[in-house]
Image (cartoon, grey):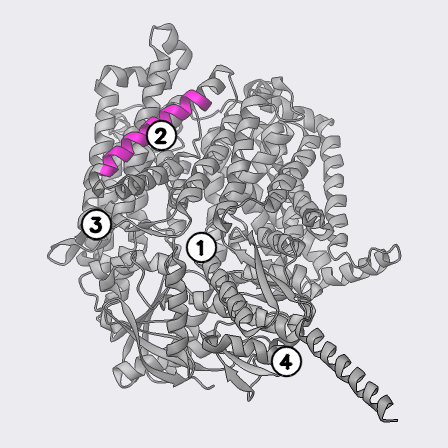
Amino acid sequence: MTVGRKAASGAPAGAPERRLADIPAAAWLAVVLVAAALVMTIARGPVAVGQTTLNGLVAAGYFSLGAVGLTLVFGTLRIINFAHGDLLTLGAYLTFGISALGLPFWPAAALAIVLTALIAFALDRIIWEPMRRARTSTLQLFLVAIGLAMVIRYSIQFFAGSQVRAVGQDVLSSLSVGPFHLGTLQALVLVVGVAAVALVGVALAFTRFGKQIRALADNMALAEISGIDTLRAVRLIWLVAGGLAGLAGVLYAAAIGSVNPNFGFFILLSLFTAAVLGGIGNAYGALAGGLVIGLAQEWSTLFFNARWKPVVGFAILIVILLIMPRGIFGVGRARS
Amino acid sequence: MTRRYFFLAAGAAVALAFGFSAAEAADPVSVTIGKLLELTGPLSENGPSQDKAVTIAIDYANQAAAAAGVPVKATAVSADAQGDPQAALSAARALVAKGASAIIGPSITPESIAIANGLTIQKKITLWPVGTSMRLRTIKDEGTIFRTVPPDSLQAYALKTALIDKLGDAKGKLLSIAYRNEPYGEGLSKDLTAAWTAKGGKVQGPVVFDPAQATFDSEAQQVVDNNPDAYVVIDYPDTFAKFGAALVRTGKYDATKLVVPDALAFSTVPTNIPPQALEGARGTRGGSDVSTEAYKLFDQLWQKAGGVEHFALDANSFDSATLVILAAAAAHSPDPAAIAAKIHDITKPGATKYSPTNLGEALKAVWGGQPIDYVGVAGAFEFAANGDPTISRFDIYEYKSGKLNVIKQIDAAK
Amino acid sequence: MSIFNVDFWIGVGVVSGIYGIFTLGLQLNVGFTGLINLGQVGFMSVGAYAMGMLVVDAGWPLALAFPAAILISIATGVLVGLPTLRLRADYFGIVTIAFSEIVRYVFQNAAFAGGNQGILGYDADWRVFQAWASGRLAAIGLGEVAQLPLLVAVWASLLLCLAALMALQSSPWGRVLKAIREDEDAAAALGKNVFAFKLQSLGLAAALATVAGFFLAMNVTYLYPSEFDPSFTFFGYAVLILGGFASYGGVVVGAVLLCALTEGLRFLELPLSSGQSGSLRFIIVGLILIGLSMFRPQGLFGGKAEMQLRA
């Protein structure tokens, strides 16, 4: 689309034009966000803007972490995995189950995350792989995802009940710096969220497996022919996606304090929004998308009643896609 | 002559004896109660506790009836409303197909309206929603809808009174209102705002929060900004667990300034709500002359049954189920229309009052054909023609160390 | 046995008819145009609310409000399609969900749409019709079956829409649509205005969604935003894929089967708690959906060759 934009502008490709198109999308994003923050500070004051920015970063932590697994699977396997949200729920509930057997919370969580990764791996072997072999269409896979989501969510509910469960972590402890405050667990979400996404991005860019996965995302057939063990790469993708989902679920549960079996499904749409906004298939895209949505939603409470918060995320998605049809960091075909 | 009279008298005595025993060994009334529960879907956190509330009501009533020699036995069938009006309508039909004589539930007004208009009005089956929306009152329900939850106008009056009790006066006092985005909060907030400003107070907000959000910190901040004199948060326990935590984290929250309505009334604060969010907070809930004993009994039954903790409005569902069983006893029949016809007779103003602590005697009285005024756990009802409770007695309570203590009772007379 | 309750199954019939009409629109988009429209419930919502508001707020008679609502939702479909149809298929899907969620939240929070209190009372004219119809049915002894007029109306409309769509499909317009779905660039190369055809397809789907929405509104007699959430669309997709890709007739059969299954499972009596029974019902539906996709991916009436739609 950049090409199209350049051509449409009509001006000869002179020096200023080229430099403009070269500045990476990340820089544009940073500039826009900072500019928005400055404008709002003038309107509402630094304390309000600062605090809502912190709140927005926390939300971004949840969204980014949850969206990374989604975007990986979508980018490489073209599966709109509607069961992803329920993998978050699975991670949280497995933690409850394991800690009920006596393990303290965080070790239980670590074990639960590993289990979730293994379950995602197993589901691929049992369900997704055979369908890939049968060359099933995207729509069919979509229906499988919906069915799988139901099975996972309602199985959790069958054993654990639909009532709200306290996670038992200290949701009240918070860090204060001047007029600003941040929940301790929320800070954890922020740090771990960003770190995990960055790690995935780095791994994709620099490790051998990462390069293989990127080749797969680009063109599966070509990747196979060039000798990449696509089967192994795909299985690794599911392990990573499942583990990230479990991690996101556990952190969400710990920081927000209480959950019920629907929470993963409720957050799913925001995760998709973040993934698409940032550019499907790109780990940094998940980060960018989560950031934009988290910040936009919390900043919107400075100007509109908080009841409109859910609309903001969706509205931003539509606006951004109209300007950048592949998402912020999106690459690849713009049309089907 | 004497011999004839003797045989006549003997015959009469025998007939009378048979007649009496026939009356005592009358056909037992077997009434099926339909539980319309939110088992799956966006409101499913509601389901387990409402299920438990109706189940313990049925068990308790069956025990009381057996002990009192009243041949009434209740059983239950359940169906999933799924949080969706179309599904709820289908669920209600399933309950009727399974033999339900009355339907306890649903939890939201759209479901209630769909079921009322699509099923229960036509079939003269009583519907007992757990909701307060004024919309429901605009339907011509032909005496089939009954609610044990007080209407918003009365509860708003109670909240206002509780606030004035705390602050001394409304004039010039800033009240910060927040509610979860749905009809319960919207209606109550509107009524309370009107009542408070009419008394010279000021209102900040309302801050309306969507329950599915990932963080509530921005909304919580808006509630505590400008250091209001009091806050009113109209919410359900599942969201309040998160919202309350966010309030505490703002660092500017004073729980003693909080007043909450009946959806956040529990004898013991559930474990998922951080205790600091409610410590010293006050609230309102339906009450009566016998509130203390009735709630105590209800809590004993709840603890004994094990299982899930309290959620919102459990006592109201308990009362609805008990009323249905009393009506079936009064009607000597599980026929839905017969039950509907008896509801006013068992909550008649001026009649002898009974409560859960003497349910057995209440059953005996109605079985014998007497009208009574049954006072439930959540208060007396004395239903108006439109099925709303008219009694306006409210408990004002305070949370201390995670336990609810009633500090006074008020009358929210219109 | 309680499962053979007539009222219950007539209710199921109404719901399957509503899903049938709704999914016919989806099939037009997905099976015949290649558009992954995940926001169909948003069009249904706009249409139903438009009708409700015209009757209750503006005092229009239902017979005028309904066609007006259809026009409004067609316009909405076009408005949504104009900026978004150029996106790649999967992004288009997500954007349409975003649209339907925006509609839902706007109706929940805006005063003009009744907000949390919804809209009530728009069905007065319909009740008059229903009473008249019941009177007529009483002549053949069916006057007491309350929802029968609604059932007949829904299914008559469904079959009419089905016939119309099938006729449309064999028309020149339909053939262009099919060409677009199979190879968009080739169709464009032949001089067809692909974009215009896609817009028309979306608009028509919106119209069908509104017809479904009309009957939904008459069934539940109360307009409330959360009735129109994405789960409705997802269930529609399940119906579509069950019935078969690119088969209108399959949609009707799929709707009946899936609704009958989901609702019929309410009568499954096992020694479980209420909560567990509730969960089990959806575990079973989910397993059936998975099994269906794995072992008969083309659905009941779809052709295997039709299936290769890759985003």
The answer to whether marks 2 and 4 mark residues whose Cβ atoms lie closer than 8 Å is no
Residue type indicated by callout 2 = Thr
Q: What element carries label 3?
A: helix
The residue carrying mark 1 is B48
Q: Is residue C158 left or right of residue A234?
A: right
Of residues A155 and B301, the one drawn nearer to the viewer in this rendering: B301
Q: Distance between the residues labelled 1 and 4?
A: 35 Å
- Dot 4: what SS? loop
Measured in 3D between alpha carbons, the distance from the residue under mark 2 to the one under mark 3, in whole angstroms, is: 25 Å
- Which label lies toward us, 1 or 4? 4
Q: In this view, does C145 lie above or below B13?
A: above
Coordinates of residue C72 in the picture (x, y in percent): 61, 50
Nearer the viewer's eye, disc 4 or disc 3? 4
Residues at marks 4 and 3 touching, judged by CB atoms closer than 8 Å: no
Same chain letter for marks 1 and 4: yes
Q: Name the residue under label 2.
A: A71
Tell me where residue B32 appears, x and y as whole percent: 61, 61
Q: Residue B368 carries which label?
A: 4
Q: How far apart are marks 2 and 4 (CA)?
A: 70 Å
Would you say the residues marked 2 and 3 are in contact, meaning their CB atoms lie under 8 Å apart?
no
* Cα distance between the residues tagged 1 and 3: 36 Å
Q: Which of marks 1 and 2 is in front?
A: 1
Dot 3 corresponds to which residue? A54
Residue, x 46% and y 38% (percent of image)? C95
For the residue marked with disc 1, what is the amino acid? Answer: Pro
Tell me, for residue A8, which label it has, or none.
Answer: none
Q: Residue at 52% x, 81% y: name it.
A: B390
SS for dot 2: helix
Could you tell me if the residues under marks 1 and 2 are in contact, i.e. CB atoms within 8 Å? no
The region drawn magenta spans A108-127
Chain containing mark 2 = A
**Dot 3, how many residues are within 10 Å of its Cα: few (below 14), some (14-19), or many (20+)?**
many
